[in-house]
Image: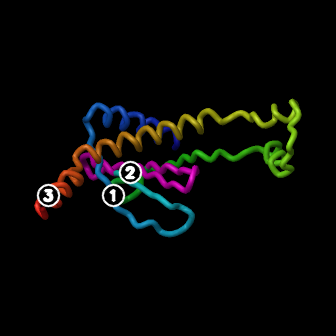
Amino acid sequence: MSDKAEELAKQLLEKTESGKLLWTFVPEAISGGDWLESEKFRTDLDDGFSFFIRRRVNGDNKILDFELSQSGRVVLSAQSRNNVPIGPATRKLLEIRRDFISPYDKEKLAEPVDEPVLARFRLFSDLFHAARKSAMSGDQTIEKVQQLLERLG
């Protein structure tokens, strides 16, 4: 399933960057929990198909949700996060809080990162930023506010 999500996300990114797809901001209430910031964008295709990309943030932790729906029914969803779990060797070193780390321990700190997980996060992140840019390109909020303030004198 995730391969399909990534394939679709790549196509959406390409179409968005070339200006063929327009995205809109989707207001949503933050439902408490640990997430301090949440932004969601949507693009609609024919036949009731819609894509959503959402980013939730709390400090350095980010989750990106990708979703395809048809007439309000979720058909495909995928998620990626930037906080890749650390391995037991690194966790043990951090728990010990050593002032001195031997060369042997330094090698354990550099644990391999799962490349497909990182690639998916980067893809979803690129799509999120392209969707945000698309949604903001038509936003005249700043100009409207400036005009209103000028009218006040």
Q: Position of residue 86 (x, y in %)?
A: 73, 45
The reply to whether the magenta stretch includes residue 61 is yes
**Which residue is denoted by mark 1 in the rendering?**
26
**Which residue is denoted by mark 3 in the rendering?**
150
Instruction: Give the residue at x 81% y 35%.
Output: 108
* Rendered position, 69 above or below 29: above
Instruction: Evaluate if marks 1 and 2 touch, with contact meaning CB atoms under 8 Å apart.
Output: yes
Foreground mark, 1 or 3? 3
Distance between the Cα atoms at labels 1 and 2?
9 Å
Q: Secondary structure at mark 1?
A: loop
Picture quadrant of residue 100: top right
Q: Position of residue 81 (x, y in %)?
A: 57, 47
The amino acid marked with disc number 2 is Phe
**Which residue is denoted by mark 2 in the rendering?**
52
The reply to whether the magenta stretch includes residue 51 is yes
Residue span colored magenta: 42-66
How many residues crowd around disc 3 within 10 Å: few (fewer than 14), some, or many (20 or more)? few
The amino acid marked with disc number 1 is Val
